[in-house]
Image: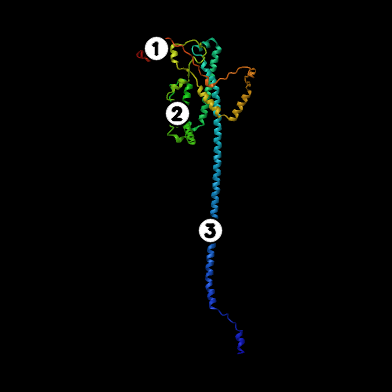
């Protein structure tokens, strides 16, 4: 036993295995692999989710930048459009002011032209003095040049508008055989050419003004006010002779050269020109309306400054005061407004037959006889 003991002791001893440990180790190895797989799957999912979130963020950033660019482009475009519209409004306002100024300058010449002599007084003036005939010819030539320049300006303005140019071909067929004067035929053709564009533009802005002001809601109640401007003008122009007669002046009211104020015309001419002379026209109402609109559209600060400057230039009027009437040295008479038109009763003397007349009218004489 002693000899065997070292041999046995020298042999390597195997570690005893416990069944429970093996079971624990074997059974624990499987959950560890499942957790690893789940963790790996979760990691992949997280990576995929992170990539998708990054892609979504990139897409949102791209859409946001594109929206910003679109907004900036729209703002720039609207800014450019507003600048173009503002410049167009300025040009239109300047053109309108110049046209009004030209119209105001023509008013004096137009009103004075009514005083020009008629035939045969005009020919007698021209034959008696050559300077008068020369002045007449110069007046006619200058008027012709002015009219030609106005028509040229109108043509230049119309050429810039494509809508008027497209609609011009249809209006060129208007017959002007009834119009003898060449200038009047040009004016008539130009009027027919621009009339459709004018009516459409006025109606468009009239509708916009109604919508902006809320006047369209009263279309059923105020039908006369909600008519288009062209319809109102057409209704007013149904009887143009009445309007023309209102503008005509009588020759007696205008100091025509070569006509004696006390001289009477023929009976036929007086009957024809009873309402007014067709050669004498007065557009003072239209002129006053243009003046009113012009002053209303002026700059208030400028007009007020001009008014104050004119007021300073005027001489100051002192109040008329009677300095000797102070301290009751003169009797003052104060008029009462309530008795300005008051009339005191005036005693009237009745005729002698008035009592007898009233007795017969009311039967007082018969009553006295019955009582007696």
Q: Is residue 295 above or below residue 36?
A: above
Give the class, few, some or many, for how many residues have Cα within 10 Å of label 3's Cα (few <14, many ≥20): few
Give the class, few, some or many, for how many residues have Cα within 10 Å of label 2's Cα (few <14, many ≥20): few
Q: How is the image coloured?
A: rainbow
Q: Residue at x 55, y 53 (%)?
A: 57
Mark 2 vs mark 1, CA separation in Å? 65 Å
Which x, y percent locates residue 238?
Answer: 42, 25
Q: Earlier in the sequence, mark 3 or mark 1?
A: 3
Q: Earlier in the sequence, mark 2 or mark 1?
A: 2
Q: Earlier in the sequence, mark 3 or mark 2?
A: 3
Secondary structure beneath dot 2 equals helix
Which x, y percent locates residue 159?
Answer: 51, 30
Circle 3 residue: 49
Which x, y percent locates residue 297?
Answer: 55, 29
Pointers 2 and 1 in contact (C-beta within 8 Å): no
Which x, y percent locates residue 265?
Answer: 46, 11
Mark 3 vs mark 1, CA separation in Å? 128 Å
Please name which of the two marks, 3 or 2, marks the residue nearer to the observer: 2
Q: Residue at x 50, y 23 (%)?
A: 285
Please tell me which residue lies in front, 12 or 46: 46
Q: Is residue 173 above or below residue 267?
A: below
Please tell me which residue lies in front, 218 or 277: 218
**Residue 4 location, quadrant:** bottom right
Residue 188 can be seen in this image? yes
Circle 2 residue: 232
Mark 3 vs mark 2, CA separation in Å? 72 Å
**Residue 43 location, quadrant:** bottom right
Give the class, few, some or many, for how many residues have Cα within 10 Å of label 1's Cα (few <14, many ≥20): few
Circle 1 residue: 357
């Amino acid at each position: 036993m002693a000899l065997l003991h070292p041999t046995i002791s020298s042999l390597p001893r195997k570690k005893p295995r416990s069944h429970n440990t093996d079971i624990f180790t074997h059974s624990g190895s499987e959950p560890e692999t499942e957790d690893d797989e789940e963790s790996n799957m979760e990691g992949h999912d997280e990576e995929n989710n992170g990539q998708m979130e990054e892609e979504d963020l990139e897409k949102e950033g791209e859409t946001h930048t594109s929206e910003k660019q679109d907004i900036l482009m729209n703002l720039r475009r609207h800014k450019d459009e507003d600048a173009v519209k503002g410049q167009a409004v300025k040009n239109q306002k300047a053109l309108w002011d110049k046209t009004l100024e030209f119209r105001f300058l023509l008013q004096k010449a137009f009103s004075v032209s009514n005083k020009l002599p008629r035939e045969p007084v005009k020919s007698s003036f021209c034959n008696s003095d050559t300077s008068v005939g020369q002045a007449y010819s110069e007046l006619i030539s200058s008027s012709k040049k002015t009219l030609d320049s106005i028509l040229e300006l109108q043509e230049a303005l119309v050429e810039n508008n494509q809508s008027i140019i497209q609609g011009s071909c249809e209006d060129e067929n208007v017959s002007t055989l009834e119009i003898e004067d060449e200038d009047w035929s040009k004016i008539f053709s130009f009027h027919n050419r621009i009339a459709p564009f004018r009516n459409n533009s006025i109606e468009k802005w009239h509708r916009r003004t109604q919508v902006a002001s809320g006047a369209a809601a009263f279309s059923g109640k105020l039908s006369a006010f909600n008519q288009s401007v062209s319809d109102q003008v057409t209704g007013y122009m149904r009887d143009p002779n009445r309007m023309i007669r209102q503008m005509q002046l009588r020759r007696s009211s205008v100091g025509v050269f070569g006509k004696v104020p006390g001289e009477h015309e023929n009976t036929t001419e007086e009957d024809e020109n009873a309402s007014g002379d067709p050669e004498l026209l007065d557009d003072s109402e239209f002129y006053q309306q243009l003046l009113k609109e012009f002053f209303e559209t002026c700059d208030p600060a400028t007009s007020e400054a001009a008014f104050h400057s004119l007021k300073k230039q005027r001489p100051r009027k002192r109040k008329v005061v009677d300095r000797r009437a102070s301290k009751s040295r003169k009797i003052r008479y104060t008029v009462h407004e309530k008795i300005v038109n008051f009339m005191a009763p005036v005693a009237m003397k009745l005729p002698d037959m008035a009592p007898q007349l009233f007795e017969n009218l009311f039967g007082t004489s018969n009553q006295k006889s019955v009582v007696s």
